[in-house]
Structure formats: structure tokens, C-alpha cells
Amino acid sequence: MPFPEVETQTQEFPTFKKKPKNKPDAWTILKHVALFIATFASVTFVGMFFWVGQTAGVESYWEMWPEGALFASLLLAFLATHEFGHYFAAVYHNVKVTLPYFIPIPIGIGTMGAVIKIEEQIQETKKLFDIGIAGPIAGFVVSLIVLLYGFATLPEPSFIENFAGHEAVISHVQETGTYPETAPEIENAPEGSTIMLGNTLLYSLLASFFNDVPPMYEMYHYPFLFAGWLGLFFTALNLTPIGQLDGGHILYSLIGFKKHRTVARICFGFIATLGGLEAIPFLFININGWYPGYGFLSVLLWAFILLFLFRKALFKDHVWIAPMWAVSLITSVGYLYFTNGFAQAGSLIWVFWSFFLVYFVKMEHPPVLFERPLTPWRKRLGWISMVVFVLCISPTPIYFVN
């Protein structure tokens, strides 16, 4: 018996668009703009007084504000591009995120950078990767443009005559038409008064194509070079493949949780070793100043600090702690011994970074709910970003000589 024909209806279900999550109100926008203005003023202030302000022959400090404002514009262009790279990637993937918070501080370079806050857990590898890599790539491009423009428009070495307190360098330039090649050629400078900025593979490569490039101990007087160098270095810091830093997001997306954990631990061991190269001389100089002849205690003190850091960072996993502690300590002490570096003061950047990683970033990246393989072009871009990290990192970012 045939079945009777039944008239069927196809029920159409309404489609729902995801409601956009990122619509800041006027008060929020005003708050972030105010922070940006305060940061611009702070960077301008320290730029004109301590870095790029042309001090020779000025009748008023306010005559130097254009150089400070130029430096602030360049540095904040990098910071804003980096953070808005993250922001717009999050908006694209409909992930709730704040506008960038710029952080003014009227010392150092005038700012502690800028941050955004992801206000929900990212549950998919693709989204994690896109949001993580958008900032470093965007900021890197801006830094590269700033740096190349700075190299292409370099003034002659006589430009250094615009700055007070550089009499020995000026004398050398007037006699030879070139900069002194190394900082020790600067005579009559007080001990520890010469600031050296660390070279990087990329900066050194780019500089080799141009003439009249200032030495690293004078480079910070050139707004485009200094802002570009800072941009590259901050990009490298963010690309450190640890925890929830940008580099951590990227490498986690590329190789997964277990492999990332191993790489992150090894990377932290390297950073802690760099911290030892700064901390031991700092402790050595101060202990020797207080108790002459007892500078060797600096090694013991750093050994205890290093052990504390590794225990905290590696969750008391002694299979990792013991060998990493020994290798890091021996490497730091050995390098300083063979290079006579115990009396050379550093900036303690890597010491600060080590503690920051342990207490704020953490070593391991939280697992993502949906781990899916990245597309081939994302994988290529991810590995390129790891190469950028190597090219832009400096083992000795800032130190003092003479």
C-alpha cells in the first residue's frame, strides 16, 4: 500500500549575526585619548632634556621642544601601530578588547609602553595567532620605515657639535671628519658616564649600507635612529616566545602546548643568563664599594636569586631547575671572567624582564579550546616573526662604559 503524499513545509530559521563587542563609549575614548596626550607630553619632556634635544647654544630649554616632540611622535607612532594592530585583529574576530592604554612615566624614555586587554578567552588557534602577530608585524614595519628614513637622511658627523658635553667627540670629528670608532677613545669622561646602546643584527646590517652612521654611544641623539632602534627592540621583547606575550601566542599556535612549554623554558634560561651578565657586575661594583675585596659575594648572591627565579618559573620541577641553574650561572660567570666584565655596569633590563616574565607573564601558555592547524601562509608568517625576534634582540641593550 503506497504511503499517502504528505505536504511538507521547510521551516526557515532566522540567522543571527554576532553582536559586535567593541563599541567604546565617549567617556572611554576620552580616557584613552587623555592617556595618549599625557604620554606624548612625557616622552617629549624626556626627549628634549635627556636624549635628542640640541643643547649647545640654546638660550632656553623650550627651544629644544621640537626635537623632543619629533622623538615622541616617532616613538608613539610605533607604539600606537603595534597596539592597534592587536586591537583591529581582535575586532575583526569579534573578540572583546579594550582600546590601547598608553603609560606615561617622566623618566627613562618617557613611557612604559602601551597595552591592550583582551577581555575574554580566545578559544581558537587561528584567532589567537592573528591577534598575537598583528601587533608585532605592524610595529616592525613602522620601525623599519623610521629607521631607513633616519639612515637615508643622516647629517654629517659635525651634527654632534649641536650637543653640549661632547667636547672630546667634537674635537675628534673636527680633526678627522669622522666619529671615534669606539667609546674608550673619548677622553676625560667620568667613569660610567658614556651610554652605549646595544647593536642588533638587523640594525648593523642596515647601517652597513649608509655613510656617516653615528656610533652606538652617540646614536640616541638622532630621533629617527633612536626611535627606530627602540621600536625594533620592543618588537623583539614582545616576540619573546614565552607565556602570553605576542611571541608566546604565535609559537603556541605553531607548535602546540607541549613543544611550546619546552621552548619557553629554554628561552627563559637564556634570558636569565643575560640577566646574570647585568646583575653580577652591578652587585660586584656595589659590594666592592661597601666592603672592598668582597666583590666575589656578588656571584653567590646572584646564584640564590637565580635559583629562586627558576623554582618559581618552572613550578619546582627540579629535573629542569638543576641543569638550567648550573648552565646559566656558569655561562654568566665564565663570560664575565674571560671578558673582564665584572666592573662594567649594565642597565638591569634583563633582570627586570626575568622577574616580569615569572610574575606577570608566566612560562606556559594556557591551552586553547580548539587547536586547529594554521594555514600555510600563517605558518610562514609565524616563522618569519621568530626570525625577526632573533634579528632585533640585543644581548646588551643599554650599558655604561668609561
Image: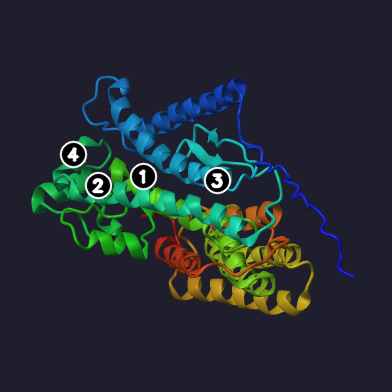
Quarter of the picture holding the N terminus: bottom right
Determine crowd level at label 4: few under 14, some 14-19, many 20+ residues with C-alpha closer than 10 A. Answer: some
Q: Viewer-proximal residue, 282 or 75? A: 75
Determine crowd level at label 3: few under 14, some 14-19, many 20+ residues with C-alpha closer than 10 A. Answer: some
Residue 247 appears in the picture as rendered: yes
Evaluate if marks 4 and 1 touch, with contact meaning CB atoms under 8 Å apart: no
Residue corresponding to mark 1: 227
Estimate the x, y position of residue 346 in percent, counting from the top left: 48, 56
User: Disc 4 vs disc 1: which is toward the camera?
Assistant: 1
Residue 150 numbered mark, or none: 2
Residue corresponding to mark 4: 161
* Comes first in the chain, label 3 or label 2: 3
- Disc 2 to disc 4, how far (Cα)? 18 Å
**Three-letter residue code for mark 3:** Tyr
- Disc 4 to disc 3, how far (Cα)? 50 Å
**Three-letter residue code for mark 2:** Gly
Estimate the x, y position of residue 342 in percent, counting from the top left: 50, 65
- Disc 3 to disc 2, how far (Cα)? 34 Å
Q: Quadrant of residue 333?
A: bottom right
Please name the residue shown 17% across and 41% down the image.
Answer: 159
User: Disc 3 vs disc 1: which is toward the camera?
Assistant: 3
Q: Viewer-proximal residue, 119 or 47? A: 119
Estimate the x, y position of residue 30 in percent, counting from the top left: 55, 22
Evaluate if marks 1 and 2 touch, with contact meaning CB atoms under 8 Å apart: yes
- Disc 4 to disc 1, how far (Cα)? 21 Å
* Comes first in the chain, label 4 or label 3: 3
